[in-house]
């Protein structure tokens, strides 16, 4: 059955998985310039051109479609990289973050509207887990967002708890930032016609991943160091 300590504790593996993911993305980014994968880049440029046809409404179109795709389980890092490619790093990050948070929130609302997981709430262990998530709000959501799972499954899991709506939104926004920044930098780097400039973006992506990963590790260590004060990570309700 679901155990809060095991679920949150699984985030200990995220550092390794995050590093592997970033390495894969970086290799993929370089491969765009030397392999047939640059066809995907060409398609991304077509997307950028098509969005430009919408003028000032382009961000709304991207955000709406991105939110819908996130709600049905599309990997958000793909959307983040496309956001960086279409709008550049800064605005790409803004619109992709907005799209993925809104899409995730839509999933949560649907889970609650149709009562999915209602029966599971009657199971004592899950009830305890849900109560702990609700109690720690934003912090719990941020930590769960670091689990090596597709965000859709995290949305479903959180939707079956009674975590506050605002805690879900704020926690998701913060939890999405680290890899979102990296993916948007990759996308913005691919937008550069100058390979040297693109390499700078790739380097920034790597640096941001290391720095943000370190900060998340410190947050993780802080939470575990305060085990006694944070029931989310203890069995005091057992």
Image (tube, grey):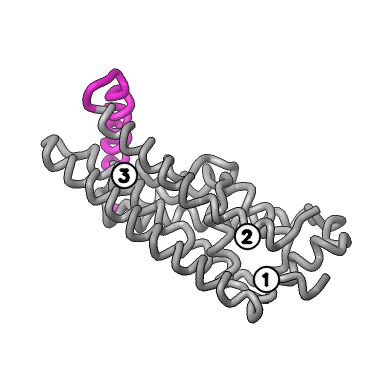
In primary-sequence order, the first of circles 3 and 2 is: 2
Q: CA distance from mark 3 to mark 1?
A: 46 Å
Q: Are marks 3 and 1 in contact (CB under 8 Å)?
A: no
Residue 104 shown left or right of residue 52 in the figure: right
Q: Position of residue 122 (x, y in %)?
A: 88, 62
Q: Which mark is residue 232?
A: 1
Seen as rendered, the residue at the extreme front is: 225
Residue at (43% x, 41% y) in the render: 21
Q: Is residue 43 magenta?
A: yes
Q: Residues within 10 Å of mark 3 (few under 14, many from 20)?
A: few
- Residue 20 figure quarter: top left
Label 1: how many residues lie within 10 Å, few (<14), some (14-19) or many (20+)?
Answer: many
Disc marking residue 54: 3
Name the residue at 48% across, 61% down. Answer: 175
- Taking the image as shown, residue 112 lies to the left or right of residue 211, namely right
Whole-percent x, y for residue 138 in the image: 56, 71
Task: State yes or no: residue 95 in magenta.
Answer: no
Question: Would residue 57 be seen by someone viewing this image from the given angle?
Answer: no
Locate residue 190, reporting x and y percent: 24, 37
Residue 8 numbered mark, or none: 2
Q: Which portion, as a residue range, is magenta?
A: 33-56
Most frequent secondary structure within the magenta stretch: helix
């Amino acid at each position: 059955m679901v155990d809060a300590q095991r679920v949150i504790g699984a985030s200990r593996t995220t550092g390794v998985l995050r590093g592997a993911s970033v390495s894969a993305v970086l290799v993929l980014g370089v491969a765009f310039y030397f392999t047939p994968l640059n066809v995907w880049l060409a398609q991304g440029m077509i997307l950028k051109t098509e969005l430009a046809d919408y003028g000032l409404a382009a961000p709304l179109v991207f955000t709406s479609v991105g939110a819908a795709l996130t709600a049905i389980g599309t990997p958000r890092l793909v959307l983040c990289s496309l956001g960086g490619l279409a709008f550049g790093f800064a605005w790409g990050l803004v619109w992709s973050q907005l799209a993925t948070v809104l899409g995730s929130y839509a999933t949560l609302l649907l889970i609650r509207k149709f009562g999915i997981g209602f029966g599971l709430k009657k199971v004592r262990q899950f009830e305890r887990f849900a109560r702990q998530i609700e109690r720690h709000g934003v912090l719990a959501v941020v930590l769960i967002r670091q689990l090596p799972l597709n965000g859709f499954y995290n949305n479903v899991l959180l939707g079956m708890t009674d975590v506050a709506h605002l805690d879900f939104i704020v926690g998701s926004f913060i939890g999405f930032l680290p890899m979102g920044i990296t993916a948007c930098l990759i996308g913005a780097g691919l937008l550069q016609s100058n390979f040297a400039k693109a390499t700078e973006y790739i380097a920034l992506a790597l640096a941001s991943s290391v720095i943000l990963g370190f900060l998340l590790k410190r947050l993780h260590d802080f939470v575990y160091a305060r085990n006694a004060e944070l029931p989310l990570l203890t069995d005091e309700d057992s």
